[in-house]
Structure formats: C-alpha cells, structure tokens
Amino acid sequence: MSSTPDVVSRDTSSIISPPLPDPLPAFDRPLKLGILASGNGSNMEAIAQAIRSGQLQAQIQVVIYNNPQAYVARRAQRWDIPSVLLNHRNFASREALDEQIIQTLQAYEVDWVIMAGWMRRVTEVLIGAFPQRVLNIHPSLLPSFPGIRAAEQALKAGAKVAGCTVHYVELEVDSGPIVMQAAVPVLPGDTADTLQARIQQQEHRIYPAAIALAAVPPP
Ligand code: GRF
C-alpha cells in the first residue's frame, strides 16, 4: 500500500522573503539618519554595516538611547558613531522627552528618524517634527501581533509564518503604512528565542533596503 502523500508539508522552509533591489536607490547626498534604540542594537549595527559596504548611501549622525545599560551604546562607540543618552526617567512627560529627542536630532542634522528597538511610545510632537520621516521595525508581519513579545505571540497563536515589518510610524503603536516585510517559517520545536533569531536575520537584511526605498522621492 502506498503511503499517504504528505499534502500538508511541515517543511515551510520554501517560504521566501522578497528579493531586495540591487543596487539600492542612490541619492544626491547620503541620507542623514538618527537611530533611536533602547537595547541590544543589532539593527543599528546592520544599518552601519550596510552603509560601510556601500549598499546603503547614508550616514548615522547619532544614536539616541534611553536606557543607561543599553548595549547599543557600546556598539555605537565601536563604530565611532556619536551616542546620546536621554533617560526617559528624567523627563516629566513623553512629550518632554520627545522635545529633547527633536533638539538632539536637529543638532546632529538628522533627516530620517530610524526606530530600531525603541521601547518608548512616541507622541505627535516627534511625529509632527519629522512628517513621513520616522520609520520603525517590528518583529511580526503587521498588522498581526503588534506590541511586545511578538515572536511569543505568534507561537502562542499557532502561526505557521512569522516575519518582520518596516513601517512609517503613526501614533498608535506598531501601526502605519508598511514599507517592507519579510517572512520566515515557524518550525517545529521553535521557542520564542529561536523564532526571534530567525526573524532578526531578516530584520537585518530588510531594514537598510527599506530605508533606501522609503527615501526615494515620489514620482
Ligand atoms: C527587534 O526585534 C525589533 O524588531 C524590535 O526590537 C528588536 C530590537 O533588536 N522593535 P536590536 O536591539 O536591534 O537587536
């Protein structure tokens, strides 16, 4: 007797991410980026690497971080990128923090605000100061699984496909028009950590490309 064909294959590794434009768009002058990060900073470093390799025509003018322990500060130092600590605990309101962020970004002549693991809600103060120029990356295929612990949310829901999204920032957390997404399979035996690691590989691949695509002037 022939065995039943495995019509619902568990091997979803053929799910692919979109091929990226190669080369990425070029600009009259390098994009001036300001990175907002609260933690590890691997996306910041992926962007720095894409710049160094010539893939992304940009400069990181400054890294702003809000948590004194954030490893991103060490990474910035290694890359010789100025970093500024703006500890949210020292500000009376979210708006007051955003005002100081804006002043810092302006002092470093930033054109594009790149949130890369920034764990604070932003207000209309920041969004209004950089209209259509604030991007965020989130470790899910938005609009599914906004908020914290997205990989864990995906596992709990039994999702078979996970991924990451680069989007313009709007007031509601993890909302706003999508610039780029990449998908990864959820594999049997995945934990939140193994899935998050797989998602992060794609984050590092798409964030530099999404920045370049977002910065292309509309026709
Ligand atoms: C990423 O997974 C990003 O999607 C989310 O926070 C994480 C930051 O990672 N917003 P890292 O600090 O860039 O390593």
Image (spheres, rainbow, N blue to C red):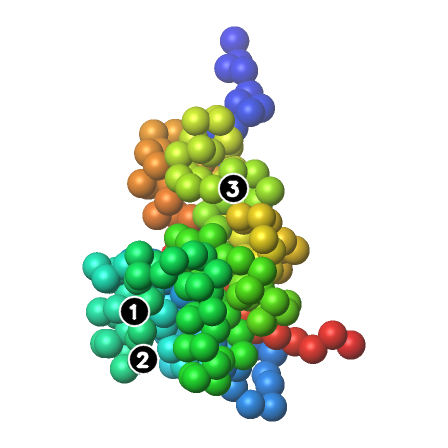
Is residue 173 found left or right of 151 in the rendered image?
A: right
Is residue 111 found left or right of 77 in the rendered image?
A: right
Q: Are marks 3 and 2 in contact (CB under 8 Å)?
A: no
Q: Is residue 57 something one can see in this rendering?
A: no
User: Which residue sits at x=35%, y=37%?
Assistant: 192
Which residue corresponds to mark 3?
A: 146
Q: Label 1 vs label 3: CA separation?
A: 26 Å
Which residue corresponds to mark 1?
A: 85
State the residue in front, 9 or 140. 140
Q: Is residue 82 something one can see in this rendering?
A: yes
Q: Position of residue 179 (x, y in %)?
A: 62, 60
Q: Are marks 2 and 1 in contact (CB under 8 Å)?
A: no
Marking on residue 81: 2
Disc nearer the start of the sequence (3/2): 2
User: Which residue sits at x=33%, y=67%?
Assistant: 86
Dot 1 amino acid type? Leu
Q: Label 3 vs label 2: CA separation?
A: 30 Å
Dot 2 amino acid type? Ile
